[in-house]
Image (cartoon, grey):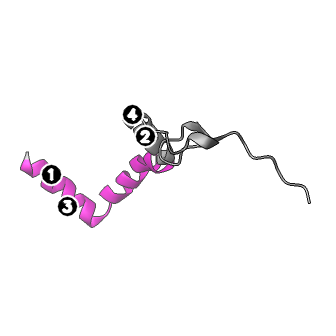
Amino acid sequence: MYAFPQPQYMPCPECGASVARGETELHLCEPERRLEFAFFQLRGEVEQFPEQFTTYLETPDGQFEAWYAAHRR
């Protein structure tokens, strides 16, 4: 049967950088790139946070936390 050709570069699972297949053991992730990649992976949750937080503040627990935070100042 026909096989698909293997790509020459693959993304690093930790930082997303394009790494040559034979150099995966030599690759070192840059901390800044790793952080950016983690943030990129969480972008959906980050975008939903304001709505989820507003919804939480409408609950009894959220109202208490808001009241408590205001009185602790």
Mark 2, residues whose alpha carbon is within 10 Å: few (<14), some, or many (≥20)?
some
Q: Amino acid at mark 3?
A: Phe
Mark 1, residues whose alpha carbon is within 10 Å: few (<14), some, or many (≥20)?
few
> Are dots 2 and 4 in contact, CB under 8 Å?
yes
Nearest to viewer (mark 1 / mark 2) = 2
In the image as oriented, which residue stretches furthest toward the bottom?
Answer: 60
Region in magenta = 44-72
N-terminal label among 1 and 2? 2
Between marks 3 and 2, how big is the CA–CA gap?
A: 37 Å
Give the SS element for disc 1: helix
Residue matched to label 3: 64
Instruction: Find residue 50 and report its horizontal and vertical position in percent.
Output: 40, 47
Is 33 covered by the magenta stretch?
A: no
> Are dots 3 and 2 in contact, CB under 8 Å?
no
Give the SS element for disc 2: helix
Between marks 1 and 3, how big is the CA–CA gap?
A: 8 Å
Q: Is residue 2 left or right of residue 69?
A: right
Q: Amino acid at mark 1?
A: Ala
Mark 4, residues whose alpha carbon is within 10 Å: few (<14), some, or many (≥20)?
few
Question: Relative to the observer, which residue lies in front, 45 or 48?
Answer: 45
Between marks 1 and 2, how big is the CA–CA gap?
A: 34 Å
Between marks 3 and 4, how big is the CA–CA gap?
A: 38 Å
Residue matched to label 1: 69
Q: Amino acid at mark 4?
A: Glu
Looking at the picture, does residue 47 appear above or below residue 3?
above
- Image quadrant occupied by the C terminus: top left
What label does residue 32 carry, if any? 4
Q: Is residue 30 left or right of residue 66?
A: right
At a point 40% along the width and 49% down the height, the residue shown is 49
